[in-house]
Image: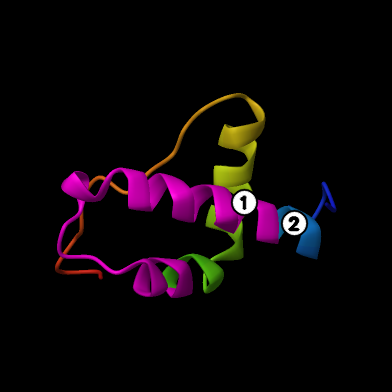
């Protein structure tokens, strides 16, 4: 990870997405109308958000999808 650019390595990205997917699937009751592929595409389009989620994981946070903003997708 490049600290200045806040970018994840490919390995970090794959591990994070795997963790998030497992958590997403475990907690489907929180987001019944969402599909993981849509969430993943949105995350991959926003690398700065992936970096933030990675930092939350590093500090033992557990980010998960809990809602959907109709206006912004």
- Magenta stretch containing residue 33, yes or no? yes
Q: Which mark is residue 41?
A: none
Residue at 82% across, 46% down: 3
Residue at 51% across, 28% down: 61
**Helix, strand or loop at mark 1:** helix
Closer to the camera, 29 or 46? 29
Q: Colour scheme used in the picture? A: rainbow
Report how far apart the C-alphas of labels 1 and 2 lie in the structure.
Answer: 9 Å
Type of secondary structure dominating the magenta stretch: helix
Q: Which mark is residue 16?
A: 1
- Mark 1 near mark 2, Cβ–Cβ under 8 Å? yes
Q: Which mark is residue 8?
A: 2
Q: Is residue 40 above or below residue 29?
A: below
- Magenta stretch containing residue 38, yes or no? yes
Q: Residues within 10 Å of mark 1 (few under 14, many from 20)?
A: some
Q: Residue furthest top?
A: 60
User: Can you give x and y, in whole percent of width and height, for residue 5 in the image?
Assistant: 78, 57
Residue at 63% across, 37% down: 55
User: Can you give x and y, in whole percent of width and height, for residue 31 in the image?
Assistant: 20, 53
User: Is residue 65 at least partly visible in the picture?
Assistant: yes
Closer to the camera, 41 or 2? 41
Q: Residues within 10 Å of mark 2 (few under 14, many from 20)?
A: some
Q: Nearer the viewer, mark 1 or mark 2?
A: 1
Please indicate whether residue 2 sits to the left or right of residue 8 in the image.
right
Instruction: Give the residues in magenta.
Output: 14-41
Please indicate whether residue 65 sits to the left or right of residue 56 in the image.
left
- The quarter of the picture where the C terminus appears is bottom left
Q: Quadrant of residue 66?
A: top left
User: Can you give x and y, in whole percent of width and height, for residue 2 in the image?
Assistant: 85, 53
């Amino acid at each position: 990870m490049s600290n200045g650019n806040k970018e994840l390595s490919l390995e970090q990205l794959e591990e994070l997405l795997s963790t998030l997917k497992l958590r997403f699937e475990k907690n489907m009751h929180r987001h019944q109308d969402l599909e993981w592929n849509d969430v993943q595409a949105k995350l991959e389009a926003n690398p700065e958000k992936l970096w933030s989620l990675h930092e939350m994981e590093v500090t033992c946070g557990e980010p998960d999808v809990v809602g959907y903003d109709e206006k912004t997708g």
